[in-house]
Amino acid sequence: MNTLIAVVVIFGLLVFIHEWGHLVFAKRAGILCREFAIGFGPKIFSFKRNETLYTIRLLPLGGFVRMAGEDPEMVQIKPGYEIGLLFNEAGKVNRMIINNKSKHSNIKIIQVEKIDLEHDLFVKGYIDDGEELVQYEIDEKAEYVYDELATQIAPYDRQFASKTVGQRALAIVAGPFMNFVLAVVVLMTYAMIAGMPLDEAVVGDVTDDGVAIEAGLESGDRVVAIDGEQVDTWGEMTTIIQDHPSEPLEFEIDRDGERFAVTMTTQERLGPEEEQQGVIGVMAPMEKDFAGAVAFGFTQTYEYTKLIFEALGMLITGEFSLDHLAGPVGIYNYTGEVAAMGILLLLQWAAILSVNLGIINLLPLPALDGGRLVFIILEGIRGKPIDPQKEGIVHFIGFALLMLLMLAVTWNDINQFFL
């Protein structure tokens, strides 16, 4: 249950902040955003506010912002159709009833001769059994109602394609960008809770299974010298200890102004390059500092970004096997393991996932934000847009290939789970 809660909270937050970035910048550009969705599939919860329908859907595998003009309108009103009209106080059409007209009172029936819902915003047609030809203005926020479901019209200036290359690029980039912002904020929170390491030769804490606690070291003890060599920083102290695995070392300790010496035989552990290192079981002193926490948020996000790009490079060159990639099942398992280790590690894991989501979405692959950005950049270079049908085909093929990769990675996760 803890794993499930952790996964729902983390992935919900990552997807929410990503899609929220798209939503905010799209609305700032004047684009009509029809829906802001977390998940895919059937709706399980929804409400509407300021032109946008906010929904939570059944399958928690992502989310989307449905912007006007990206998909064809579901209902097209053609010449010869009979529709019902309702008017606002200004005398403009503010609602068009497509079917089930008998359920609506006080509507004016018109047989459409011509209608423009994108540019000139008018409807022209016959009333009174075809005896009178009339024309009415349509309000820019009018709705059409089909099967009792109201949908706001999207004049061309509210559609995605009507905006400048820069505005559209910002609306696309904003999603991944917000994932980097989230990573910075999460890591700042981590640093404020855990504190920032100080580069001083002072014992921050003592582990229960190290030689330091057996020797009587306490939090706050300052290491003055090791085997007669003076040390001033945490880095100097740990370097000497690590360079002498399973060796006795004499430590000169200052505790509240009183000095004493103690000899400890270091323990061994495997270092990052598979070499043996010495340890005594002490942790660095920590300080809770807002400025340091802000710096840590940015620097650590940069480090995670660099590591992920290095992994992608190794994947391209073949140094990194597809077997090491994790899909939803693998990430679910890893999240459970991290959640069991405590909130601090879970915060770091959430930041890593957020950076990863931002980078993956920026890759120039069809169906991803990066792929859409490529088409926008090409439009800026060419001075005219790519054929929407051709672009749609490319994104469809890309999406299909991504789904195949997802299935392959998920299958690998399941196999690893049963090994």
Image (tube, rainbow, N blue to C red):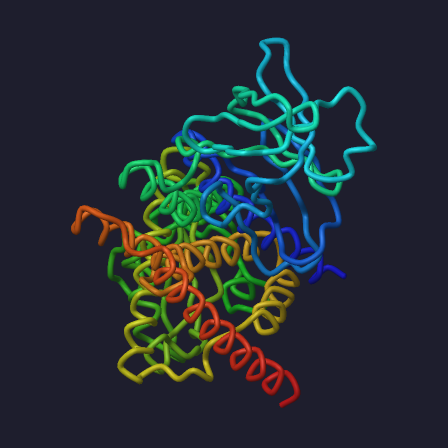
Q: Residue at x 40, y 50 (%)?
A: 176
Outermost residue, bottom direction? 419
With 208 as the anchor, is 392 left or right in this view?
left
241, above or below 162, in the image: below
Q: Is residue 55 left or right of residue 295?
A: right
Say which quadrant the N terminus sits in: bottom right
Q: Residue furthest top?
A: 89
- Residue 47 higher or lower than 310, as above or below: above
**Which residue appears farthest toward the front when viewing the image?**
131
Q: Nearer the viewer, residue 7 or 166?
A: 166
Q: How many marks?
A: 0
Spot occupied by residue 62 in the image (x, y as percentages of width and height): 56, 57
Find residue 264 and report its image quarter. Answer: bottom left
Q: Give percent across and percent down for residue 309.
A: 31, 65
**The C terminus is located in which quarter?**
bottom right
Q: Would you say 100 lies left or right of 393 here?
A: right
Left or right for 147, reference 144: right
Query: Residue 76 appears at what percent x and percent y?
Result: 56, 44
86 or 329: nearer the eye? Answer: 86
Residue in front for this viewpoint, 244 or 120 = 120
Q: Is residue 286 visible?
A: no
Residue located at (26% from left, 62% from top): 228
Image point (45%, 42%), residue name: 22
Q: Quadrant of residue 316?
A: bottom left
Whether residue 25 is visible, yes or no, is yes
- What residue is drawn where x is 51% and y is 33%? 115
- The location of residue 55, given as percent across then percent down, is 66, 44
